Amino acid sequence: MSTIRPMTADDLPALAAMYVRSFADPALGEHWTEPAAQALLANWYNRQPDLAFVAEDDSKLLGAFVVGVRPWWDGNHLVDGELFVDDDSQGKGVASDLIREVLLQAKAKYAPVVWESYTFKGQDFPLNWYKRMGFREIDEWVMIRADVADVLNKLDT
């Protein structure tokens, strides 16, 4: 059984190593390094420390969940975030425990009406896992991205 507690800055190096291991799958198309992962997690931790939690068992970190709050026209939304669990601890309810604790904390402090997030498309996991919790794909939205240099170049021509 895991214990859920608030994340601390001291957790960041170990969490960064776990994050790299969690997303090292070449099929995901992400190429994380520990310094990059630590910078990402530090950004989340510094931005919304009250919604940054870790799961641990006997002082061994098992996973983490961080999420932000953004006001929107219909109330506060939980946005983006990062949820990851060490490979050895997956399938044992750690992610569910983390989500439950963060959502309870968020509900008490911010009264969010929606949690919006991103996940990988074209794979059964984790998309179907999220759908079982009540998530749905938003047909009206599409995630877009562009290279900053390309945009600036096109704006200048």
Image (cartoon, rainbow, N blue to C red):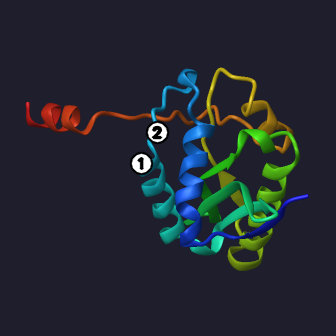
Amino acid beneath label 1: Ala
Quadrant position of residue 24: top right
* Vertical arrangement, residue 124 with respect to residue 5, above or below: above
Q: Are marks 1 and 2 in contact (CB under 8 Å)?
A: yes
Amino acid beneath label 2: Trp
Residue at the farthest bottom position: 109
Q: Position of residue 56 (x, y in %)?
A: 77, 61
Left or right: 47 in relation to 145: right
Depth check: give the residue in front, 54 or 148: 54
Depth check: give the residue in front, 100 or 25: 25
Depth check: give the residue in front, 35 or 27: 35
Q: In the rendered image, which residue does mark 2 sit on? A: 32
- Crowdedness near tag 1: few (<14), some (14–19) or many (≥20) residues, C-alpha within 10 Å: few
Depth check: give the residue in front, 138 or 66: 66
Q: In the rendered image, which residue does mark 1 sit on? A: 36
Q: Position of residue 38 (x, y in %)?
A: 47, 55
Q: Quadrant of the C terminus?
A: top left
* Residue drawn 77% across the image and 77% down it: 108
